[in-house]
Amino acid sequence: MKRIFTLIATVLAISCQAYAQNSENMENFENMENGKTLVAYFSATGTTERVAEMIASATGGKLYEIEAAEPYTSADLDWNDRSSRSSIEMNDGSSRPAIRGGFENVSEYDVIYLGFPIWWNLAPRIINTFLETYNLDGKTVIPFATSGGSGINNSVNELKKAYPSVNWQSGKLLNRTSETGIREWLQ
Ligand SMILES: Cc1cc2nc3c(=O)[nH]c(=O)nc-3n(C[C@H](O)[C@H](O)[C@H](O)COP(=O)(O)O)c2cc1C
């Protein structure tokens, strides 16, 4: 009789554990659905923005544009001109272009997709401004980028070195991608 009770108690305990695990998984899923995912991006000419919109749509995450307080003109973006604003910023590791407005609730988000165009094989310095404005220590950050051909690894490695307390996930270059490609990557 005692054995039967022990058996029933064990089966019940295992069922409860499985139920709890399942509820936790559902909660994680609902958190993503409820906007605990942030898709923060900087885009000077709209390419990264289109990708960010697709990621937000696929994850149900909140979209946040990291906008420069002083928008970049096409002259600012001329990488052939060594004295253009972008060249000056990228040549100066301590440059931190100001962000327009603010986003107060970053701490509410557990997962942050962080998108940017590759500039000089790096993330634009405004991404450093973002990372230094908000405390992302321990947050899961998934970088993504667009480029004219450069890979994402160098820029992500530099970010990892500069902000080691962030829980960096491997980044993804999303050039010429589609909604389907993004869903496949997210899975
Ligand atoms: C200042 C500047 C520097 C760039 N440096 C690189 C680079 O090093 N490698 C690369 O493949 N593309 C480079 N590009 C091209 C951009 O990464 C690419 O066009 C990107 O998709 C633009 O994204 P956006 O439209 O979101 O700004 C550079 C563009 C600019 C404006």
Image (cartoon, grey):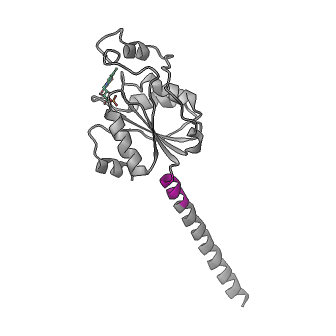
What secondary structure is the stretch in magenta mostly built from? Answer: helix
Residue furthest out toward the bottom: 1
Q: Which quadrant of the view contains residue 110? A: top right
Q: Where residue 51 appears, x then y in whole percent? A: 34, 40
**Magenta-colored stretch includes residue 177:** no
Tell me the residue at 26%/39% (across/down). Answer: 176
Q: Nearer the viewer, residue 92 or 86?
A: 86
Residue furthest out toward the right: 2
The total of numbered circles placed on residues is: 0
Q: Is residue 170 left or right of residue 48?
A: right
Tell me the residue at 30%/48% (across/down). Answer: 179
Q: Nearer the viewer, residue 34 or 7?
A: 34
Q: Which quadrant of the view contains residue 79? A: top left
Q: Where residue 21 appears, x then y in whole percent? A: 57, 64
Tell me the residue at 38%/20% (across/down). Answer: 72
Q: Look at the image and give the residue range highlighted in magenta.
A: 27-34
**Ligand 1 rendered quadrant:** top left
Tell me the residue at 37%/32% (across/down). Answer: 152
